[in-house]
Amino acid sequence: MGELKKHTLKEMLERSAELYPNRPALSWVDGKPNRYLDVKDRVQEISLLLHQNGIIKGDRVALLSENSPNWGIAYLSITSMGAIVVPILTDFQDNEIQHILRHSACKAIFVSEKFYGKLDVSAPNRLRILLENFSIIPPETTKERLNNIINTGPKEFAKFKESALKMTGLISQDVREDDVASIIYTSGTTGHSKGVMLTHKNLVFDAVATLKIQDMNEFDKLISVLPLPHTYECTIGFILPFMQGAAIYYLDKPPVARVLLPAMQKIKPTMMLTVPLIIEKIFKTKIQPTFTKSAVLHILYKIPFFRKILHKAAGNKLYQSFGGKLHFFGIGGALLSPEAEQFLRDAKFPYAIGYGLTETSPLIAGCTPSVTRYRSTGTVLPDLQVKIEKKDPSHKEGEILVKGDTIMKGYYKDPERTKEVFTEDGWFKTGDLGTLTKDNYLYIKGRLKNVIIGPSGENIYPEELEAIIGENDYVLESLVYDFDGKIAARIHLNYELLDEQHKGVKTSTMEKIIADLLQEIKQQVNARVPQFSRITKVIEQPEPFTKTPTKKIKRYLYTS
């Protein structure tokens, strides 16, 4: 068994179990490894459990849980029997979760103990399965009574498993490439959640295409920290490594530094995925302040030659803190700040930036760390077509359009919205603006809907202004938007750094320091941009911005 005969998740599972039966597959960092053969056996058992409880091909089954080995087992159990998985982001509000369950008409849900309280336990005709031990939760079970299920579940499942052995193969379904495998409800920056239908071929083809630009094999190890319901982590951090026989590890606590650092020293991952905000925060709050502790260092850091040396030293420490074995550090989900990327380049850190959307399964462009280019998201994936549609020939950039086997089937129960995002000749409109070089490197300028039109029709890209604002040592994040025809910027400052440098000052004095700093930032930015792009108003953002699970600011909360 070499190449995949069909681009389906079921075929991928069977191939991996045959090629890598005794390799570790899905495991807790501190737990006993689940081998690929173990995963296949468990998937068959859970598929049968679903079948015996009335779930058939085409039914929707939700999955609500933190990252865990059983998340992947449930995902493969649902899709391998031809049912459709509906992964739900745990950051969604309770009412959003109820809406997703109703809109998708889910007949069953796998839920972890931690998130059981988010469900409406009185909802009729919906099978509920506890993810920790795959035991069925009786109707009307409250969260308080869930402990009984946790304690008795393993014995009940053991009985089921014994009888299931006699029935293996009875639910073998013909899963086709164009069958919908997953409906993913996005948590975009606009606030309008929609169900993206991705087929088996969409997901598996994207993983196969990614392999052509970034190698991965059975000796690779990955710690999964981003939410699995997001396609970035699901395709690149789960489906792809699973297809190649790599070992995927999960944390049993949130991935804060005190949990993640020991895990990385223990596992020594060769690959990791992250989003820009995480690496930007590490750089801004942990690395950059070390270069300003003394007057001498502060002066040296301003000289490019010495800054590169300092970045190299700090980058090596960061690399060792990740376990010292990384050969691929993937960054995606949003634009990375120029200063954070320059640090990674100077440090020779093995990073690569990728670009994609949920609707494209997700990757459209990416590359291996050895061929990255500054500010580029890499090259377009093999077997995908990308073109730039310019509405104004005088502009270098235009909307990025994509065509290929990774493009979604459409939005669930929403043909009108589906029609809106495709051209008449079948190109998917990403809503992102960018440029494409002759050798296929893609550069992103920003979101089409975020563009501000200047007084004489000029295009002003908030993301570019935000990048310049972010270069100030005291800025953690910012948001630029149109405010009654003028350009405004909300700025969240590094209050920890300010407090450290102004200990003991009165509240009124600190308020004056902050007001002066905001004006100084405004002047610094305006001195570097054309007159039509200059910021008119700066607003202090005392609290961190509300974000999506992939750490993108929910712009609509602050610009409407």
Image (cartoon, grey):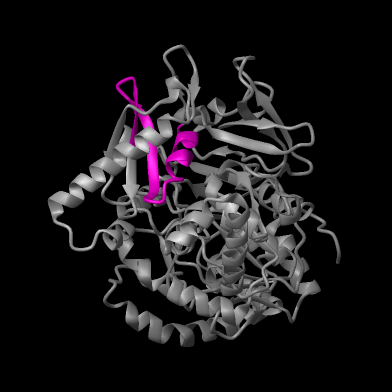
Along the viewing direction, whichever of 138 and 252 lies nearer the viewer: 252
* Image position of 18 with respect to 243: above or below: below
- Please state which of residues 394 and 116 is positioned toward the viewer in this rendering: 394
Q: Residue at x 35, y 67 (%)?
A: 116
Q: Is residue 483 magenta?
A: yes
**Residue 512 versus residue 304: which sits nearer the camera?**
304
Instruction: Measuring from the top left, give residue 449's x and y in whole percent.
Output: 47, 28
Query: Among all residues in the image, which is located at the extreme front?
Result: 296
Was residue 111 drawn as part of the magenta stretch in this picture? no
On-image quarter of the C terminus? top left
Instruction: Note whether residue 97 is visible.
Output: yes
293 vs 323, left or right, is left
From this view, report whether residue 387 is shown above or below residue 517: above
State the residue lying farthest toward the right. Answer: 2
Image quarter hosting the N terminus? bottom right
Q: Is residue 244 left or right of residue 480?
A: right
Residue 22 x %, y %: 74, 82
Residue located 60% across and 36% down the image: 444
**Horizontal side of residue 176 vs 543, given as left or right:** right
State the extent of the magenta-drawn residues as a range: 462-489
Q: Residue, x 39% and y 59% (percent of image)?
A: 125
Image quarter of residue 88: bottom left
- Who's the residue at 62% across and 60% down the image? 309
Q: Against 12, is 447 above or below?
A: above
